Amino acid sequence: MRTFLLGAGASKSYGQSPSNQRMPVAKDFFPTFDKLQISANPWALQEGLLGYLAKTGISDPNGYLRTGIDIEELHSQIESDRNKAIAEGREFIDYMSEQRAYIELIFIFASAINEIQNGPVSEPHREIANLLSTEDTVITFNWDTLMDRALSVETGWNVNWGYGVRPRSVFADGWKPTKDKPKDTDAPALLKLHGSTNWITGYALLDEGQHVLSHDLDPDTLHIFEQTNEPYACFAGRYMAGYEPYSYGYYPPNLTDVPGRAAPDGRVIVSARPKVPWREEGSAPRNGLVSMPLIIPPVKHKTYEMFGSLFANLWSSAEDALAEADEIVVIGYSFPRTDMQSNLLFQNAFLRRSSMPLVTIIDPAPQYVADKFRNEFGINGDNLRVFKDYFSEDFDLASVL
């Protein structure tokens, strides 16, 4: 039984994008975003982010974002400023720019990833998929759908049941009820511990300082985008065509047949959208509940609890997989020092083990990760294999496993 752990280095292996870009990291995000067509689309909103930066005293917000700043630190600062305003009991108008910037960054992250992965199926991920059996598990902290798509073409894996949690509905030319896993299907599980660009939820709101979702369903309710051949209903009808399966334009499909969150007693919900001459109207339908990508953004205080038990169940399944695996393969994951949750995941899993797994590390700078497995998780030299290399189209994964 194998468990693969994929980090940012695994996503960087995708070099087949028509955009000619690879997945960005924290410090090159906006320079990479600038090279994508989506960055010049007026439907891809950035006003809230730029307004927040201006509010903090930055005279040239556009230039500031292109100076190599750490986008994770910026998103964390936005979150911190917003939460501080809430804790101080200030009116929403006082932290509206922080909330808007926080949400816009989530959409910007998702749109950049969708644009880059909108090409042929990733060859490195296909190689991983061909090495997996139904007993194996892939764990990833990445939001992209490179592994998802590779699994779907190389194995019997399907979005209806392949994520380890059951979605409420799947969008495949319209929202459809989830299908059960066919008997005798040979496909591994794919556990996405920080969500995914094709996972959809209700729009995030603040209600008297509390983080809530716009739908009136259990917070752990998950919807999955698979593919579309026709325009779908979305915010302001701003559907964008030309995307491969598991990817979409800036706006995901609205949620239909989903109840919206009711207004508190004595209040009503009013919706208004300003129209501006530099942003033409969309022509797609607009019915349904406005949605957004369900991803855990790269902030210091990750709001897993906002989605009920969804992520608790995923992380529990990941711990089980790590505790039971005979072999663990780590590709391009650096164990960020600030991500205590991932460290705790491994610690808890290895405390449950009665045997030592074979651990393979593939990374261009593997020393820190190798030392962590030796010193913190107790993997001895005979059970630890380290390959100081980039995972890429040229890396022969099958020959080292």
Image: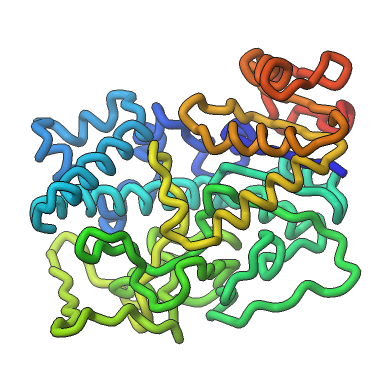
Task: Give x and y (percent) for residue 167.
Answer: 60, 70
Q: Is residue 266 above or below residue 205?
A: below
Look at the image and tell me whether residue 315 can be seen: yes
What residue is at 53 percent from the left and 53 percent from the top?
195
Q: Is residue 20 above or below residue 155?
A: above
Look at the image and tell me whether residue 15 can be seen: no
Q: Is residue 191 left or right of residue 339?
A: right
Nearer the observer, 46 or 121: 46
Task: Give x and y (percent) for residue 147.
Answer: 67, 49
What residue is at 87 percent from the left and 61 percent from the top?
186
Nearer the observer, 344 or 385: 344
What is the tally of numbered marks visible in this picture? 0
Q: Is residue 267 left or right of residue 223?
A: left
Q: Is residue 87 above or below residue 386?
A: below
Quadrant of the snapshot with the C terminus:
top right
Quadrant of the snapshot with the N terminus:
top right
What residue is at 78 percent from the left and 72 percent from the top?
181
What residue is at 77 percent from the left and 27 percent from the top?
395
Task: Give x and y (percent) for residue 203.
Answer: 35, 66
Q: Quadrant of residue 368?
A: top right
Task: Give x and y (percent) for residue 291.
Answer: 39, 68
The coloring applied to the image is: rainbow
